Amino acid sequence: MSALPILHRLGALARTNSVKSLIGSVYLTETAQAEQQQTSPFQELARSWPWLPNRTELKGPRHPVVLCHGLGFFDKTPEALPRFQLHYWGGIVDALRALGTEVIIARVPSTGTIAERSRALHRQLEDVLEPGQQVNLLAHSMGGLDCRHLITHIKPTTYKPVSLITLSCPHRGSPFMDWCRDYLIDKAVPLSSAILTKTMLARMIDCPAYANLTTAYCQKVFNPLTPDSDEVAYYSFAASAPSAFPIWHPLYLPHLVVSEAEGKSNDGLVSVDSSRWGKFVDTVDCDHWDLRGRGLPGSKFQVVDFYRAVAAFLYSEGF
């Protein structure tokens, strides 16, 4: 019996299997591409921020978001520099509004005490909010303490805070402010001769607010006198600088001080432990100033995406 018919049949079978394999590969490739095309913006965010729930829609919160800034900014009036207040948040405001979120940009005394800043925030919100309107407070750094003071001590009745998210807020103070008190303020070291003069830190230290940010004040005075409200949901995020700062970086000195004092992760001004308050959500890899929307050149932190994720998180939490 000739072997040729058998070889022909085997060749045909091989060709058939190859075609099937090719068709299968094409099908799988097209299926994967289709699934990738169906991935929603929300799911794209969820890949970077695992604390987002498994949803398919990207929506901003139902209630207005009040962006509350930290220490050392906005000492110019809107008339003198009308667009300056947007600089603190960079492209965050536009990104949140693109989600359909109503955004209110708070403006409080840049170097005032917690109580002064809190009262200024309250007056602004009374002016812009409708009676009985619910709001979400989203606060960076010292702004979180302002909001806690507002909720607990002012107890607004014309509007209603329903949530507070704090971002790298020194709830338990910052050892760097302790260091400034011990070695700069109390010792009357002229700031004009210190290395701080060429950084944004000079304005932070030479102001009445610094005393409100020491570890002793926050832990022994402010926190005991400022309990949380049962009517407000409290959330917090911390930040941790992914690597040591170069010596020329404005946060090099404070990062060194905080690290030496607490020996723990920090963002250059506030430790992760100090940032925890209420329901702790996550620690993000960035420095303290990255979170305000305008970090220093070279930062790789995707701050706009982070705030979009926070907005989606608020929506998922029912706010």
Image (tube, rainbow, N blue to C red):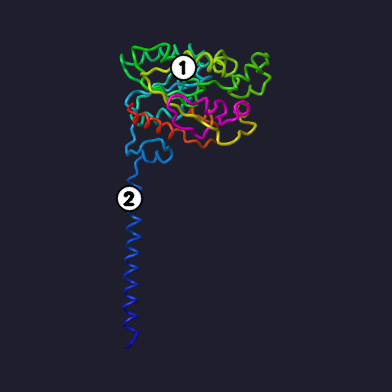
Of helix, strand and loop, which one carries label 2?
helix
| Residue at 53 percent of width and 18 percent of height | 219
Image position of 44 with respect to 218: above or below: below
The residue identified by callout 1 is 146
| The quadrant where residue 163 appears | top left
Secondary structure at numbered mark 1: helix
The residue to which callout 2 is attached is 34
User: Could you tell me how far apart the alpha carbons at marks 1 and 2 are, in whole angstroms?
Assistant: 48 Å
| Range covered by the magenta-colored residues | 258-286
Residue 87's disc number:
none
Provide residue 268's location: percent of width, then percent of height.
57, 28
- Point out the frontmost of discs 1 and 2: 1
| Upstream in sequence: badge 1 or badge 2 | 2
32 with respect to 109 (left or right): left
Amino acid at dot 1: Asp
Amino acid type for the residue under numbered disc 2: Ala
How crowded pointer 2 is (Cα within 10 Å; few <14, some 14-19, many 20+) is rated as: few
Q: Position of residue 1 (x, y in %)?
A: 32, 88
Question: Would you say 275 lies left or right of 13 here?
Answer: right
- The x and y percentages for residue 161 are 37, 18
Q: Quadrant of residue 204?
A: top right
User: Residue visible at 36% across and 18% down?
Assistant: 231
Residue under the image location 50 percent in, 23 percent down: 169
